[in-house]
Image (cartoon, coloured by chain):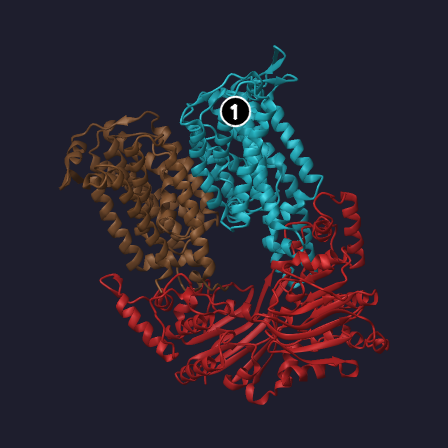
Chain colours: A brown, B cyan, C red
């Protein structure tokens, strides 16, 4: 018997493969390294955000603030660089801890005041967006030699594809997060919290420490995604990255993570983002299909995976 | 009102253990406090609204000024009422959904779908206004019923079930519009958004009408009570013969209906359907309105009037920011701070910490006084 | 044997319920100490206080001569008190090995050393004669296996005190013997074991001493070898009622016995709870269901109310066969149930007394025809007066009432729809002793008014006091039916003990 928990992962992977094969069969140039590396490049910031979202959702929570945190991080970074003439690395060194602190505060409020993550991170979403617009409502272009250097930095691959710095950052953090989730005590605690917080507490897991760390980590990754997003757009914009939290949540669910928590894989989320990306690419290649089909197809995919999860879980012997 | 109850109970507790009488007294006290708390339920949101309005009056002395022109009242107060109409409508439906212990993230997307359906129907020559409005309402009801069915029959968490339509809904609306912004010329329909009746803008009347209708439906029948019972304890409600699944579907259907009305107002307002932007993030404002109105997200008691006051507070806040000359960019930040304060005040632990701080303050002051 | 853990005069109150009142427990190293009592006696609460999962209101915990204040389970675990809670409190989504070692995972280079963890897990489980895939998620295994894994986790923690709350509830006889073998080994190592169970034969097989609780109070501490089973049952079930209540037995019993049958169960079986249960309730009579916890008495109530689906057999009410798939079906047929867990299944906490009383009536009339406020108040006031519900007015939220008054409100809720058959599951549980008598009086007056009742209770004296007939259950079967002169608590107790 194949382990049940891998079934959604396999389905996502197969769908991704099927989608890719359909695209390749239909369009010339679809099956190229370039298309694949572009998937990485275009989705790097979403991938990084979705890593954090996976953690939060596995723990049984949700983080609606990530889109706004991306915008805030981008705006703050670009303001520090262009108006205060900081070196980008200095700016990153300030922005990243600040972002992490933001998440830690949300985690603290959720834990201490026993408020629902949904509503607390919703407030966080408004707060981060509000701070971003307060700093600047305009899009701030970044013109710094460091950014030019970063743009040129990439690993060339055959077939005119190349992995840029953003993709590399994602790959690095994917490895780190996957290792943390599957090989560290903290990772086990995250799963434990999502499985049953009460049992986890009775078994000696510190709920406070775990909850706060989870939201801190999610905000850290969103902040990092915001920085990566500035590599992509060469600017910071307070009204950018709207709705990224929904994309991230969708990717997590499509990747086979249980929205009620306790089960899921970081790898699944990555596949989920790629699946959404391939659908997008397919629609772009096709040219006649309109962009709204992406939303509808993603909605249908979500429905499919949620019902699938229901069916898979309905079969397990449940008690207490 | 609430804080007095908090202050009584810690002292009363040890006594309660020593004698039954003391316990009864404490219970009565708590009960009395609870009674006044239900009065306080109305007090705090109303106080907040009044305070906000007074701030406006302070900044702009002509704020309460109303003029009558072309058979219609004009003035900032009317503006606030008019502009808050979509969120107020959504808040009515959201109150019911939240009362059952659920949440509906899809209402903004439903607004977009309904707007698109109506706008496209209006392109058909000589279509009757009634047909268009009915079609819009039916689409809203259907969307709400789908949400309700997902929640009660498939047992999907409300956040997730309504997330589906939130994501896909806008796609569907764009599909109907074929990605265009569909504009129309139809005086009758436009009147829903910009018309007037008895000197007041039409959206205000729609909100009043929907409020009265819902109040009638909920309080003159047993539906309101059933919704509260299901929200407080779904299992016990099932045990005493209430069909909790139907009740939930009903709540989501009404939320869909309200979203349809809000969608028609917004569409009529700009005489066009913009599937990308109509009702964007309004679901969050609606949830916020209900929460500011004092409802618990865990379900239970609801008050439509309070939720509408919540919607008014949100709109007044936005107006205040404009009137005060602060740049509109502070809008979000201030909104966030308001949400956070409201949320924290709802948490018992925070109130206890706050009243603890307060008592400490009195204590320190008293000590300082002694030293003098 | 030296004293290792002492609990002195522990009290714990919940809103409306006194869970523990001045309860004490003395635990020596190297003993198996059985903690016994019926549901709601306070065993689980005592365990939770002992292990830091819940705070106590008053009293001391002395561990190895030092006063302790455990605020979290982690603190208790650190000093060496490890607990296996009643419901399997493990994480079904994690692997067996992760469940065994959560918080104590072996590490290498800062990362979890999975191979070592799996080897260790296998060797721990070998003791329990369990040969399973330790890498598979826990949810794949049966409740019995999960229970053993939970116990194995407690044992693997090498604690000084091991608390087992109903560890054998889902184990078969062989598994129980394996467990007892391990407990005996632990005993020899000097571990003190608190053993909570409702299987009395297991108590006699494994335990050295017994502490009995009843209704949140300490009843006594006994040496197992010196306490006969009937006395133990007496201590657990109590003889708390005043003589005037016990002396009921109106002479019309015999007359009533000939009246028509209202409810009949014919060899009803429900998966995992009752087997081939046959039972009749005559019109205008009260039938009691006696038996220890887990004997199936509550499950009969659930089956009659349509909460549990029948596997086989049939239920007839007034001659008509019932098809019950949900509570509404039972309500329409005229059956009402006051559930065992009042807080979770009964009251709708934040709603007022008035609303709680009229809800069932309103639900049966339908949503469209709303009872007017005046009618609601009239009904509520009628029952507040009739049942003497202690409240200043009908608008008080029911959650603020005491347990006894809450129970009366729930009774009123059903009386308002005038059911043919009223099923009461533990009507006097978690209620002040004074309120017991009132509820009993009420039950008797209902019978006199011609209503039929089916009552499951662990309070034998009370059951005997108001029942015309008592059906004794044991291990999911009905073993005896007692009527007339046989109907004394002594006989019932004997039937429970001997079958």
Q: Quadrant of residue C338?
A: bottom right
Q: Secondary structure at mark 1?
A: helix
Identify the chain of the residue marked 1, using the numbered disc in the image. B
**Location of residue C449 in the rendering, given as x and y in whole percent from the top left corner:** 83, 64
C289, B333: nearer the viewer: C289
**Location of residue B173 in the rendering, given as x and y in whole percent from the top left corner:** 45, 31
**Location of residue C248 in the rendering, given as x and y in whole percent from the top left corner:** 81, 75
Name the residue that disc number 1 marks: B121
**Relative to residue C214, is residue C401 depicted above or below?**
above
> Can residue C266 be seen by looking at this rendering?
yes
| Residue at far front of view | A25
| Residue at far bottom of view | C226
**Relative to residue B106, is residue A176 depicted above or below?**
below
A320, B142: nearer the viewer: B142
Q: Quadrant of residue A164?
A: top left
The quarter of the image holding the N terminus of chain B is: top right
Callout count? 1
Q: Residue at x 48, y 27 (%)?
A: B116
Q: Residue at x 17, y 40 (%)?
A: A162
**Location of residue C230 in the rendering, given as x and y in whole percent from the top left corner:** 64, 85
| C298 sits left or right of A226 in the view | right
**Relative to residue C7, is residue B350 depicted above or below?**
above
Q: Residue at x 41, y 38 (%)?
A: A296
**Relative to residue A254, is residue C320 depicted above or below?**
below
> Can residue B294 be seen by looking at this rendering?
no
| Residue at far top of view | B70
């Amino acid at each position: 018997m194949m382990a049940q928990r891998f079934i959604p992962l396999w389905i996502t992977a197969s769908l991704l493969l099927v989608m890719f094969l359909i695209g390749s069969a239909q369009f010339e140039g679809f099956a190229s390294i370039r298309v694949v590396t572009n998937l990485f490049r275009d989705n790097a910031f979403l991938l990084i955000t979705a890593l954090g979202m996976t953690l939060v959702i596995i723990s049984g929570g949700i983080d609606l603030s990530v889109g706004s945190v991306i915008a805030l991080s981008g705006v703050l970074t670009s303001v520090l660089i262009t108006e205060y003439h900081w070196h980008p690395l200095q700016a990153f060194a300030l922005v990243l801890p600040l972002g992490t602190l933001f998440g830690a505060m949300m985690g603290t409020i959720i834990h201490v005041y026993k408020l629902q993550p949904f509503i607390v991170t919703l407030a966080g979403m408004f707060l981060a967006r509000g701070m971003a617009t307060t700093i600047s409502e305009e899009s701030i272009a970044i013109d710094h030699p460091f950014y030019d250097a970063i743009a040129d930095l990439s690993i060339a691959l055959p077939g005119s594809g190349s992995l840029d710095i953003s993709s590399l950052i994602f790959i690095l953090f994917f490895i780190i997060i996957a290792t943390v989730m599957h090989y560290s005590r903290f990772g086990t605690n995250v799963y434990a919290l999502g499985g049953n917080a009460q049992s986890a507490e009775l078994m000696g897991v510190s709920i406070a420490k775990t909850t706060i760390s989870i939201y801190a980590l999610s905000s850290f990754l969103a902040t990092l995604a915001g920085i990566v997003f500035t590599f992509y757009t060469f600017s910071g914009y307070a009204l950018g990255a709207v709705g990224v939290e929904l994309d991230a949540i969708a990717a997590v669910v499509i990747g086979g993570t249980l929205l009620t928590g306790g089960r899921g894989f970081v790898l699944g989320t990555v596949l989920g983002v790629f699946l959404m990306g391939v659908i997008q690419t397919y629609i772009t290649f096709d040219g006649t299909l309109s962009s709204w089909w992406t939303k509808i197809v993603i909605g249908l995919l979500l429905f499919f995976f949620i019902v699938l999860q229901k069916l898979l879980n309905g079969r397990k012997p449940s008690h207490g | 009102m609430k804080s007095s109850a908090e202050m009584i109970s810690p002292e009363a507790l040890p006594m309660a253990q020593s004698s039954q009488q003391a316990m009864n007294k404490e219970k009565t006290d708590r009960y009395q406090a609870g009674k006044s708390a239900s009065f306080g339920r109305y007090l705090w949101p109303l106080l907040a609204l009044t305070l906000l309005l007074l701030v406006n009056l302070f900044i702009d002395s002509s704020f309460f000024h109303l003029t009558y022109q072309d058979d219609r009242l004009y003035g900032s107060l009317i503006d606030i009422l008019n502009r808050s109409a979509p969120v107020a409508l959504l808040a009515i439906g959201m109150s019911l959904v939240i009362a059952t212990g659920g949440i509906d993230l899809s209402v903004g997307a439903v607004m977009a779908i309904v707007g698109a359906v109506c706008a496209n129907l209006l392109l058909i020559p000589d279509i009757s206004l009634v047909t268009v409005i009915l079609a819009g309402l039916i689409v809203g009801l259907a969307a709400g019923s789908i949400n309700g069915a997902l929640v009660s029959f498939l047992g999907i968490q409300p956040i997730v079930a309504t997330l589906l339509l939130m994501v896909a809904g806008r796609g569907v609306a764009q599909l109907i519009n074929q990605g265009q912004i569909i504009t129309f010329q139809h005086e009758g329909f436009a009147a829903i958004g910009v018309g007037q009746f008895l000197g007041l803008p039409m959206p205000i009347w729609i909100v009043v009408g929907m409020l009265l209708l819902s109040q009638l439906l909920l309080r003159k029948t047993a539906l309101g009570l059933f919704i509260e019972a299901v929200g407080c304890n779904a299992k016990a409600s099932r045990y005493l013969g209430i069909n909790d699944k139907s009740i939930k579907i009903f709540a989501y259907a009404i939320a869909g209906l309200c979203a349809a009305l809000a969608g028609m107002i917004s569409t009529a307002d700009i005489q066009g359907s913009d599937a990308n932007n109509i009702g964007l993030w309004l679901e969050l404002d609606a949830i916020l309105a209900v929460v500011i109105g004092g409802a618990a997200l865990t379900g239970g008691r609801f008050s439509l009037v309070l939720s509408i006051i919540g919607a008014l507070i949100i709109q007044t806040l936005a107006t205040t920011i404009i009137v005060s000359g602060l740049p509109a960019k502070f809008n979000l930040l201030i909104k966030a701070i308001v949400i956070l304060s409201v949320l924290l005040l709802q948490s018992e632990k925070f109130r206890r910490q706050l009243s603890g701080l307060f008592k400490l303050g009195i204590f320190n002051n008293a000590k300082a006084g002694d030293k003098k | 044997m030296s004293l290792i853990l002492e609990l002195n005069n522990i009290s714990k109150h919940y809103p409306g319920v006194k869970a523990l009142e001045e309860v004490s427990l003395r635990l020596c190293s190297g003993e198996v100490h059985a903690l016994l009592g019926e549901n709601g006696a306070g065993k689980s609460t005592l365990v939770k206080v002992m292990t830091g999962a819940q705070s106590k209101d008053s009293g001391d915990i002395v561990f190895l001569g030092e006063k302790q204040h455990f605020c979290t389970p982690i603190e208790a675990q650190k000093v060496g008190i490890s607990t296996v809670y009643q419901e399997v409190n493990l994480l079904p989504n994690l692997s067996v090995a992760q469940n065994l070692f959560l918080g104590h995972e072996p590490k290498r280079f800062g990362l979890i050393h999975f191979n070592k963890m799996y080897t260790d897990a296998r060797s721990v489980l070998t003791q329990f004669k369990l040969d399973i895939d330790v890498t598979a998620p826990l949810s794949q295994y049966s409740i019995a296996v999960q229970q053993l894994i939970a116990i194995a986790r407690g044992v693997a923690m090498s604690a000084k005190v091991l608390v087992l709350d109903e560890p054998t509830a889902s184990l078969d006889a062989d598994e129980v013997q394996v467990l007892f073998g391990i407990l005996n080994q632990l005993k020899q190592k000097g571990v003190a074991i608190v053993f909570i169970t409702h299987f009395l034969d297991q108590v006699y097989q494994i335990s050295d001493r017994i502490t009995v609780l009843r209704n949140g109070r300490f009843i006594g501490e006994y040496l197992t070898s010196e306490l006969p089973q009937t006395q133990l049952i007496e201590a657990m079930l109590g003889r708390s009622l005043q003589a005037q209540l016990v002396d009921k037995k109106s002479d019309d019993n015999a007359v009533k016995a000939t009246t028509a049958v209202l409810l009949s169960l014919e060899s009803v079986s429900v998966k995992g709870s009752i087997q081939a249960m046959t039972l009749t309730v005559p019109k205008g009579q009260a039938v009691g269901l006696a038996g220890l916890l887990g004997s199936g008495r509550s499950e009969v109530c659930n089956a009659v109310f349509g909460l549990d689906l029948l596997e086989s057999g049939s239920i007839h009410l007034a001659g008509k066969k019932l098809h019950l798939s949900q509570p509404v079906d039972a309500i329409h047929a005229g059956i009402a149930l006051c559930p065992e867990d009042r807080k979770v299944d009964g009251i709708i906490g934040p709603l007022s007394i008035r609303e709680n009383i009229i809800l069932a009536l309103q639900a049966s009339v339908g949503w469209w025809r709303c009872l007017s406020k005046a009618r609601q108040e009239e009904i509520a006031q009628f029952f507040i007066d009739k049942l003497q519900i202690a409240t200043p007015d009908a608008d008080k939220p029911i959650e603020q009432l005491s347990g006894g008054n809450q129970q009366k409100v729930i009774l009123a809720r059903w009386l308002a729809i005038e059911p043919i058959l009223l099923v009461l599951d533990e009507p006097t549980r978690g209620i002040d002793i004074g309120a017991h008598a009132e509820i009993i009086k009420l039950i008797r007056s209902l019978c006199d008014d011609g209503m039929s009742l089916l009552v499951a209770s662990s309070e034998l004296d009370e059951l005997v006091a108001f029942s015309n007939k008592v059906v004794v259950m044991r291990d999911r079967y009905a073993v005896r039916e007692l009527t007339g002169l046989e109907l004394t608590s002594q006989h019932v107790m004997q039937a429970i003990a001997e079958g």
